[in-house]
Image (cartoon, rainbow, N blue to C red):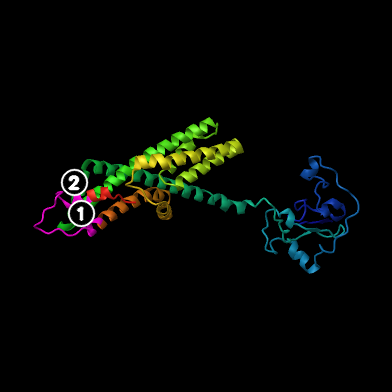
Amino acid sequence: MGVAFPRHSCCHRGRAVPAGDLPARCLSGDRRSVPGHPVAARGGPPGRLGRSPRPSRRGRVPVRDRDRRSHPRRSGQPARGRVPGHQRQRVAGRGKGPVVVHRRPAPPQRAGPEPDRCQRAPDDRAEPEPIASGALATATLAAEIVAGLLLALFVTFFFLYDGARIWRWCVRLFPRAARAHVAAAGQRAWTTLVSYVRGIVLVAAFDAALTAILLLALRVPLVAPLSMLVFVGAFVPMVGAFLSGAVAVLVALVSNGLITALLVVGGMIAIQMLEGHLLQPLLLGRMVRMHPVAVILVVTAGAVIGGIAGAIIAVPLAAVLNVVIRYFADVAERPPVSEGSSVPDGSPTEEAAAADDRSPPR
């Protein structure tokens, strides 16, 4: 008399097999030794036919739960489908009775260096967000730079083309009694600014040329970038020359050694002495001369407020304010002129300009 097995309880797929004919491998979960099984038909290693394995105490199922667990529909499991291997447990009753299958919890997964695909999928989906935000920020910055350059070109063109009319309109905003002094102060400020820009550009070009010759003579690499750095640093008096010279010395030390770095230090000191004692007095003149302490304070304040651009425009702005303040101070010290008296030089503007020429600002 055969024993009927549940569909998912054994490898015989529900066929009636005598209890005495069940091999030990079938009862222990190995299908390779079962006659007619696909694994055995493919030529797998023969199973061990003999005595049945001793059932483990952990795998035993109470008699009252054997029927309920042997039927998938009664236990709430689907009638069709295969149970995963790590959730399958077979209990053999020494070759007697059916093989009972019940579910057991899956073993805990070990945390390894390789994350699960389900956990890695949200990270993969989140990767394009930083890339998109970075591309958007770059595009926004590029658009702002282009718009600023176009606006600067537009304003510069109209200032050069119609600057006199714009200046007269600005002067008319002041009271009639102060228009002459405002115009004179503006003229002095414009002259100071033009002379400063012209002189500082020439000084920067001279420093860059001498630095390039020095680096080429010592065979220091990166001559062109270092020369451009010296040119830009010359627009920031004292501080810019020190920083650009320090970068050149560092490059020479790394690439050519200590002796070349010391020679670069000596050459940069000679260039700065030549600039301070010859070029600046000759090209900039006494009009934009400021005390070194004032220059350092102004450059520091400009760098804190506006960064590199603030450090570059801090000195010319301070020079312009110096000229304007000294002009109005001279006007305030001058005795008032009565209405009936005549002015020998013609206008208060010419007197202020002559007085300013006699005592240039320091």
- Determine which of the numbered discs, if any, sits on residue 165 in the image: 2
Residue 20 lies in what quarter of the image?
bottom right
Residue 249 lies in what quarter of the image?
top right
Q: Where is residue 113 in the image (x, y as percent from the top left)?
A: 68, 51
**What residue sits 31% from the left and 51% below the top?**
361
Tell me the SS state at disc 2. Answer: helix
Residue 177 versus residue 221: which sits nearer the camera? 177
Q: Mark 1 points at which residue?
A: 181
Residue 340 versus residue 77: which sits nearer the camera? 340
- Determine which of the numbered discs, if any, sits on residue 339 in the image: none
321 relative to 307 in the view: left or right? left
How many other residues sit within 10 Å of disc 2, few (<14), some (14-19) or many (≥20)? few
Amino acid at the residue labelled 1: His
Q: Which of marks 1 and 2 is nearer the N terminus?
A: 2
Determine the residue located farthest toward the bottom in the rendered image: 64
Find out whether residue 265 is within the magenta segment.
Answer: no
**What residue sits 53% from the left and 52% below the top?**
126
Amino acid at the residue labelled 2: Arg
Q: Where is residue 37 in the image (x, y as percent from the top left)?
A: 78, 45
**What residue sits 8% from the left and 57% below the top?**
340
Which contiguous range is marked in magenta?
Answer: 330-352
334 relative to 225 in the view: left or right? left
Residue 72 sits above or below residue 307 on the image: below
